[in-house]
Image (tube, grey):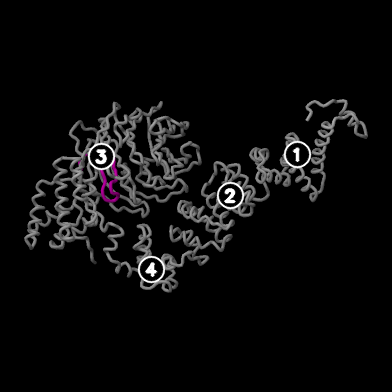
Amino acid sequence: MTQNPDLKLLLALLTTPVIPQNIPLDLLYQTASIGAIAMLSEAVEKSPQENKQEIIQTLRTAVKSAVSEELQKRAFAVLIFFGKKNDADAIQAVFDLAIQDRNELALEAMRQYDFQLPVSEQNSAKYWILNNREGLKKIDPELRFLTKYFLQSSIGIQNRLLHTEKAIQPNWMIIAAYFQSISSGQPDTQRITKNYGSFSDQEKLLFVETMSESFIAQRSIIADFFLQYGDPISYQACMKYQLRPQDPDQHAVFFFLTEQWDLYNQSDFEYRKIRKTFIAADDVFKRRLILISRKTGHVAWLRDLDASVQFQTERKTLSLSQWFELIQSLQDSGKMQKLWELLPIVPFCFTPMLYQILESASFFPQNSEEINFFTRIGNMMNTLPQTIPVPLVHRYFSQKKNPIQLCISPDSEHLAASFLNDEIQIWNIRDRRIPPISLNSCSSFRAMSFSMDGSHLLTATRDNRIQIFQIPSGRMIKSIPSQKMPLIGLFVDRDNKRFYTVDQAGFGAIWGFPHGTLIREFNCQTSDLLRVSFDSENSRIIILSQNGKLTCFDPNKSQTVSSFMTAPDNFILGQNHQRGLVTCGSSSNRISCWNLMSQKAIIEDTSPEIDDRILSILDILPGEICALGTQSGTCSVFNLCSGSKMAEIYNQENVGAITAMQISSDCSTFFLARMNSEITEWDLTLFHWFTKTYSILEIPSAKELDDFLNRSSLPAVKNSVLLMKAIADWRRRFDIEIEFSE
């Protein structure tokens, strides 16, 4: 269009009742089209309501289809003018342009002016498209309006909602995508089943209610989810709508778990299906079946279940604490013959204890072969070390002084150590020919964590910045500006797509990984944080407060899972929190172990055989065995049940306080850092052999034992392996298998 039209021609056009003959067509079109938009604008203001909607739609069409960008902007300016006057039809037109037509002008206007539509569903969709977290949270915190709008929309708008960049709540997109797949006739059950367990209670409720009301023919999947996850939300829906699993073979177990006994009795006979399910189930599902049985009194099938089957499926009958209690019980009742029968099958760490009990009671076997074996074991006791040997594997040398933190990548490829007021060094564990790399910062480091694939190291510096480094290059790819408070914990989620930070005041944040974009903040709802750690799956935060309160917090759901008081002088929080168990240490060297789910102590209070002050705790077998590092530099492994020392990490050189302990992902090696700048790696293979319950087929072979001896020729190691060989040969010779009867 002409930028500077001839004023004479315009004057002629305005003053002549007919079109001047010499006026150019482009000027004539320009004036006519601009005039048309002006007429439409005037008509919007003066026309009755029934005609106004048609005029607004004409303007919307002009925004989409006018032949020039200038005319499109002029038509859009009219809609904005009336939108600012809260004209509902104009605002609706702008919304339709933004959502349905993906018009950039409309999207920017919705973001700038925050027009409010009369329908809550549309306002929710607007905030979702604009990625306006606060606006969406204010009007639709549970996303019910957004879900309703999604279900009522065309496939095009649904795809627009599903492919929004920087989605505020990715779980909603999974839920909505499943609803869309149902409508298309090809339900994507695999994806929703995989992710349902990670949904928050609010997200589960949204899914369950929408399925129950809008997809009645497919809502039996809710019963499948209850079978798999056992959550109360799916249970309530199953009871309300009388749902059943899609697979008829699962009905009996479903009725059993939901305590519908009339229906259960009709679908099973003498607990046959429950027994069959129990044998094939994993440990979590077995616990659910046992819990319901004990709660309701349906325990006959448990009493009848063959103990040998339990051993084959669970691969372990008794924990170390249960073995200890069994031995003490048999000793108290004077059943020496039974103790003699147990000697070949107990974990090897109990062999000296059993032999001492039998010898003190002047016990002697009955036949000559057993006498020879008993005498041979006795001779071995004279050379057997008092504790289980833990051989040294490697020393990690550094010019830096005072290592204060250790971190091992989940793939056990790299070891990172941060030094007091200094940098981080990273070693390649598997190939030690590769020299260590150094990570520098203008400030020293307060916390660090590897990504799940070991490709990045995240750090929190003492000037409150977050830095992300590539491994093994050591190149910094992201530095996030200073946070409000000092960060005392960070870790990468198991999906390797997010990481979490926690500061001293109890506030935290969820960040995108590895780009470091803030997703949202959360409040741990506890103050005066003393120690922060994370569970074994890197999904929950474990907090020890200064008053001894232990808190388990789920950052994804922004809710406290459990919170309870322990001993008020607890100041150490253990690491390696498997099975929901956490070990704590007090200033008076008292050790306790707590179950985060039941909020009860499984080891209430034990005093290990140690004189020095305990500085750090690492669980080797949570609830059973832990390593304790002390101020003087000794590191010992203790049985939590008895408080007795099981192993000791010997160090003959300069002694320095234990500042950090870590265990590899497969628990095969153990890493120590001392204040005297020494970082060492120790082999736990023999320790695990001595503390495990074996069936005959599982006992380490002679070749495995010999290969281990070739790696460590210490006399203590050799004598310990000889004991294992003697007992293993005896068991194989007489086919002594583990059997328990009531």
Image side of residue 30 versus residue 93, left or right: right
Chief secondary structure of the magenta span? Answer: strand
Query: Does residue 624 show up magenta in the picture?
Result: yes
Quadrant of the frame with the C terminus? bottom left
Can see residue 728? yes
In the picture, the quarter occupied by the N terminus is top right
Q: Disc 1 versus disc 3: distance between alpha carbons?
A: 76 Å
- Magenta-highlighted residues: 610-628
| Circles 3 and 2 in contact, beta carbons < 8 Å | no
Number of the front mark, 1 or 2: 1
| Mark 2, other Cα within 10 Å: few <14 / some 14–19 / many ≥20 | some
Q: Which residue is mark 4?
A: 273
Name the quadrant containing residue 405: top left
Q: Is residue 611 left or right of residue 155?
A: left
Mark 1–mark 2 Cα distance, whole angstroms, equals 36 Å
Residue appearing at x 49%, y 60% in the figure: 222
In the image, farthest residue toward the front: 703
Residue 247, how many percent across, how many down?
46, 65
Q: Are marks 1 and 2 in contact (CB under 8 Å)?
A: no
| CA distance for labels 3 and 2 | 51 Å
Residue 441 at x, y percent in the picture: 40, 27
**Secondary structure beneath label 2:** loop
Q: Earlier in the sequence, mark 1 or mark 2?
A: 1
**Mark found first going from the N terminus, 3 or 4:** 4
Q: Which residue is mark 1?
A: 66
Residue type marked 1: Ala
What type is the residue that disc 2 sits on?
Asp
Residue to which mark 2 is pinned: 140
